[in-house]
Amino acid sequence: MASKQTSETEGNGKGKHEVLRQPSEILYHDELEALKQNDKDPAPDPWRLSPRSVLMYIIGSNKPMKANIGGKTVDVPITRKFFGDDTIVERAIVTLASERALLLVGEPGTGKSWLSEHLAAAISGTSTLTVQGTAGTTEEHIKYSWNIARVIAEGPNPTNLIPSPTMVAMNHGSLLRFEEITRCLPDVQDSLVSILSDKAIAIPELPDNNMIWARPGFNVIATANTRDQGVNELSAALKRRFNYIHIPVVTDHKTEVEIVQKRSGELLQRYQMPVALPAPIIDLLTTVFREIREGKTDDGVSVKKPTTTVSTAEAISVAIDAALYARFFGSGQVRPSDVARNLVGSIVKEDVNDLAVLKEYAVLVAKRRGERDKNWQEFHDAVLASIK
């Protein structure tokens, strides 16, 4: 069973099929199964869950659900996967139920791919049918390719065709995830137009069997970074076939603290690291990120903004790095100095002049707060020591 496989690979790390990360449909198998067993609303064909249950899977539930898991009746908590406006998730689900393609747009690190993966896992039962958009993505990656050696020997026939994730999703009536669509060249992007319009792929090399038609349930969830807008702008024809949903940057401090706490805790558990991130450390970290991102502190002090994206995802990375640093090279307890040491690599990426941004923040903000709070004083001292 999938739940047993999850236990073997995620629990003790010594399972036969050990992998670095399982897809959501395996990691959250018990939650999906509990929702399915308790689902009383009709689901669009061939969705695994009703729209209401898909929403509950993503935004979580205040009380656990009773379900038969592995032959035992247990209480299964439904955890929140996406932190933000719940209406964003509702609109995404409605879009997919209408068979209109969905485009999630936002700053890097706002959870577009995370939401895309969980939508696919809950609706189709698989989140692995994915096309990763890059400058090297070709039309073959989106449609199909051929086993050249067999084509030379036998000529083109259906058994020599290599289906793309798109074609597999069409055949199974599943969702296709298209990551970073604006990184693809315009000609490659436009190969999606006929797929989204006609729900079909033409195979001219096979005159007797030259069309693949999508089964009910097929749809596309694409993502695009606002930082990439203009790199390879979508054509007007392609834009018309997508419903745009913008994923905003998390601005609420309480929500950002909850995100960093939850995700960093999950990752440290996966790494089997016996290190805790104290609440004051997470509060300090998220405060630094929010104030530098907004260019203004809670006290009304204006500070410089860096050229790089200061996202919640970066805050999670810094939290993990600080915990690992404390475990391997420190006392085992995460300190503000551990956060400061690992913060530099997240703030200073594209432009070395961003060191001045971090230094200004330490001098103008952290130093003053350090007069009242020893955590801020330690953070200030470690930042200045790291950027000398």
Image (tube, rainbow, N blue to C red):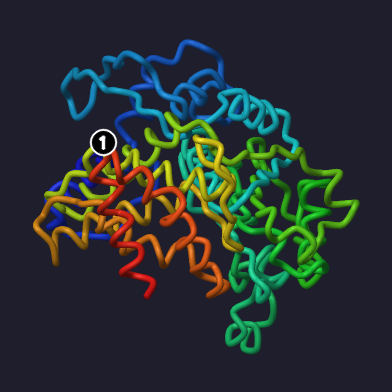
Residue 153 appears in view: yes
Please determine whether, in this image, residue 359 is positioned above or below residue 51: below
Amino acid carrying mark 1 in the image: Ala
Left or right, 15 with reference to 111: left
**Residue 211 placement, left or right of 151:** right
Within the image, what quadrant is residue 87 found in? Answer: top right
User: Residue reaching furthest left?
Assistant: 331
Say which residue label 1 marks: 279
Which quadrant of the view contains residue 247? top right
Q: Residue at x 82, y 54 (%)?
A: 193
| x, y percent for residue 16 | 17, 59
Q: Which of 366 and 192 is in front in this view?
A: 366
Q: In the visual, does 69 lie left or right of 369?
A: left
The N terminus lies in quadrant: top left
Point 16% across, 22% down: residue: 72
Q: In this view, does 145 lie above or below 94?
A: below
Q: Residue furthest right?
A: 236
Q: Position of residue 348 (x, y in %)?
A: 49, 68
Within 10 Å of the Cα at label 1, are there few (<14), some (14-19), or many (20+) other Cα atoms? few
- Give the camera-side residue of 354 and 370: 370
Q: Residue at x 62, y 70 (%)?
A: 161
Tell me if residue 203 comes above or below residue 109 in the rendering.
below
